[in-house]
Each structure stands twice: as C-alpha cells, then as structure tokens.
Amino acid sequence: MSYYNPFQSQELRIPEAYREEVNRFCQSQTDALAKTTPDESPFQRYVDLWFLAVCLGARKGKRTKVEKPHRFIMGEILSRDPHRIELLELIAISFSGEPWIIDKPASVIELANELAATGLPEVLGLLGDGPAKPIWNLTDGLLDLVPRTYPHD
C-alpha cells in the first residue's frame, strides 16, 4: 500500500552536538556491540525520539537553528507512520499561519528539524532527570507536562 509522503526526499536532522546522547537512548544504536533494553533506551528508532522533540519544540513555540546538522535518515521513514506526516503538516500550518505551506515539503521539514532542535534538550533532560531508569524518568516527566483533568473533578 502506498501512502502520501511529500517528505520522502527531505533530510531529518538533529544537531551534531546531541548525536551521541540520542544514540544512547535509541535501540537502533549504531554501535553493534551495544545491547539495549527499552528501560535504558526507550526509543526504538531515532525518528521516534526526533518526533517527540518536534512536539515538545512546538509546545514551546520556538525554532532553533540546527547548527552542524547530523542527517540521521531521509523522510521516507515517515511512510511507516503516516499519521506523523499529517501532524507535521498541521504543526507547520499552525506555526506559519499559512495553509499552503504544505505545498513546500522542504519548508515543513526545516521547521520540524528546528522544532526538534528546540525540544531535544528537554527530551534528553527528561530521560536523565530522576532516580529511575530512563523510560520511567521520561514517563514521569511527560505526565508532569500534561494537565491532569478528570471528568469528575
């Protein structure tokens, strides 16, 4: 089955300065000798951590120029998760105020890469902050970011 993916030829990037730390928390580490567990490396792929960083960067409403970029994969990976394509387009429309930005895939991914650069320090901080293993530190940190409202409150 073929999915809509205007980002196939676009580069997904993170700042080189975060490469080693991102590698540590991803199960698809490039170090073949490293054995990873979900507790220590909660993200299956780089794109998963990158996408959370995009979302947290969007939450902050700030773009950060990607200095010394590290291209970790091409946008064709997004075909595996088509909902992410739609979310990236919605984020781009929200930030630009221009619905036709989705006709400019390079602009959408540039924005996403810059939002990821903003959100990466927060994601990495959440993974390392706390007494537990990274997965639980991240979970607790993300829960703290989400307002808790219940229907019966």
Image (spheres, rainbow, N blue to C red):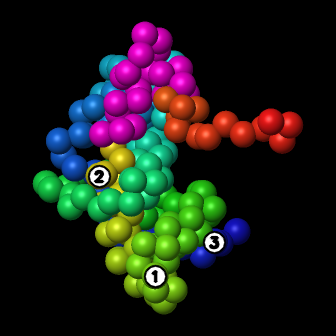
In 3D space, how far apart are the residues under numbered discs 3 and 2 (Cα atoms)?
A: 27 Å
Mark drawn on residue 97: 1
Relative to residue 135, is residue 11 depicted above or below?
below
Q: Which of 44 and 123 is in front in this view?
A: 123
Residue at horizontal 47%, vertical 12%?
A: 132
Mark 2 or mark 1, which is nearer the start of the sequence?
Answer: 1
Tell me if 23 is positioned left or right of 2 in this view.
Answer: left
Percent coordinates x, y for residue 95 in the rendering: 43, 72
Q: Regarding mark 2 in the picture, which secondary structure is present there? A: helix
Q: Regarding mark 3 in the picture, which secondary structure is present there? A: loop
Q: Judge whether residue 73 can be spotted in this image.
A: no
| Residue carrying label 2 | 117
- Residues rendered magenta in the picture: 121-140
Q: Dots 1 and 2: beta carbons under 8 Å?
A: no
| Residue carrying label 3 | 3
Q: What residue type is labelled 3?
A: Tyr
Q: Which of 110 and 129 is in front in this view?
A: 129
